[in-house]
Amino acid sequence: MKDRYLEITYRKGTPFAAYLYLSRKLGIKSTKSKKIENGLIADFDETGKPIGFGNMFTRNNIYCPDKFGSQFTRDNPIG
């Protein structure tokens, strides 16, 4: 895989989960996962380099951590 990309899984037309694949060589797999924040999980390869981030959506919000720790909701899309 050359480029990073975002994969979003939907259930009944609503976002359920997302996974951000980071750029990496073909065949590199996750050997360790670590919970970073509430709902956010990082996957690492055998050298400890991050290769992707997973995020589970809750019913009314999408957890999107940033340096301010804001949470985006359907009623407050700018956090």
Image (cartoon, rainbow, N blue to C red):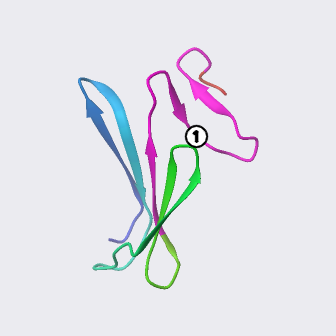
Give the residue pinned by disc 1.
64
Q: Which residue corresponds to the image point at 39% horizontal and 76% vertical from the top-left?
A: 31
Percent x, y for residue 45? 43, 77
Q: Is residue 58 magenta?
A: yes
Q: Is residue 44 above or below residue 37?
A: below
Q: Is residue 65 left or right of residue 9?
A: right
Q: Is residue 44 magenta?
A: no
Q: Residue furthest left?
A: 12
Quadrant where the image shows the N terminus:
bottom left
Percent x, y for residue 48? 53, 79
Quadrant where the image shows the C terminus:
top right
Q: Is residue 62 left or right of residue 69?
A: left
Q: Which residue corresponds to the image point at 63% horizontal and 32% vertical from the top-left?
A: 71
Q: Is residue 13 above or below residue 31?
A: above
Percent x, y for residue 30? 38, 72
Q: Which residues are magenta?
A: 51-76
Q: Is residue 6 left or right of residue 75?
A: left
Q: In the image, what residue type sits under mark 1?
A: Cys
